[in-house]
Image (tube, helix red, strand yellow):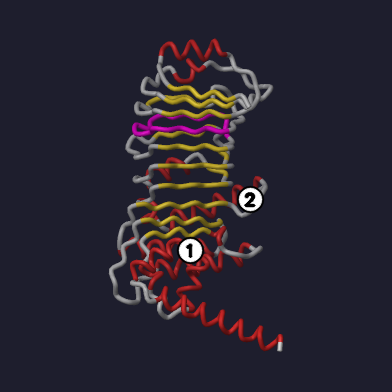
Amino acid sequence: MESTCNTIIRDEDSTTASENEDRISALPDHLLLKILECLYMPTAVQTGVLSTRWRHLPHQLSNLQISAQDFPGTLVDQIMTEYTDATRRFLSPPPCGCNRVIKILQLCFYLADPYLSSIAHAVGDAVKIGVPEYLEFAATGHVKCPSEAELVLFRQRFMSFFHACPGPFSLLTKLTLRSLSFEDSDIPNILNTCNQLKLLSLRSCQMGQDPVLKIDAPCSELTGLELIDFGCEQVELISAPKLLELVYDSWCGENPPVYFRYVPQLVRVCFASPALSWQTPFTLSECLSGNRNLSILHLNFRTQMVSYSSLLVYIRFVCFNVSLLTS
């Protein structure tokens, strides 16, 4: 008897769930698309596969955020296989003949072969149909603590991907790279090709043979530069006329960490790093005196001492908001 009751309850629950699903499926397409945009990406993929009512909807999404971290699996090949299939499916032309325009496209993926070429072709075909208003790539190595050889390998894979799809890169709005070892010509090539790039974020990367990172991009649209745990001896901002914000978190080179040349629009600077025993102290006036538009300065010295007299001397010349953290 107990078994029968349980069976009845399950049947009622199943009927209720089916009725609820039918009610949702009865909604017009534009509301279903809003629901799809809020779903976890693998769930959205399954929805398009399993339901005939929803099958055409993923091809109509105008805001796409596809991240490899959202796909289940413990092996990179397993994750990237599902990720690549999903990317191709979502970026393929709509089978229903509707005019879908992708407004926002954000792709976050691992630098693993042979999947990068498939991603490049999928994005290349998509931008031929319509140019997104916002296009973002976030490419990362899939090793937690990569060796020098792996950093070089990830760089080679990314640059091959970069050269394979110059069209999409020329439309790129934001680029985030993690765990790469750059050659001296890589960053100039990226900035020259990505002529619509607004934000460049380099995380846990390093310069290879040339220890100096040089940003010389007089025609660039770059407004933001993030260097997080970036390995180099020096950063030179030679020419970045539209740069508004610089974030430099954790450096291991000489002081001052950055030489500012022509950055006339620079408004906000964030420096955060503990001082290493061999680094020579530097004054803010030495580093920032040429930036007259600077209005926001964030400093975080990670529990270490800072000379307030040096800070105050600089503030006398330039009036701006200062956020100082020592812990």
Mark 1 or 2 closer to N-term?
A: 1
Position of residue 325 measured from the top left corner of the image (x, y, whole percent)? 57, 25
Q: Pointers 1 and 2 in contact (CB under 8 A)?
A: no
Q: Nearer the viewer, residue 55 or 244?
A: 55
Left or right position of 128 against 17:
left
- Quarter of the image containing the C terminus? top right
312 to 60, vertically: above or below? above
- Quarter of the image containing the N terminus? bottom right
Please tell me whether the stretch drawn in magenta is mainly helix, strand or loop.
strand
| Residue identified by numbered label 1 | 39
The numbered dot on residue 19 is: none
Residue neighbourhood size for the residue with mark 1, other residues' Cα within 10 Å, grouped as few (<14), some (14–19), many (≥20): few
* Magenta-highlighted residues: 232-249
* Viewer-side label of 1, 2: 1
| Residue identified by numbered label 2 | 150
* Local SS, label 2: helix
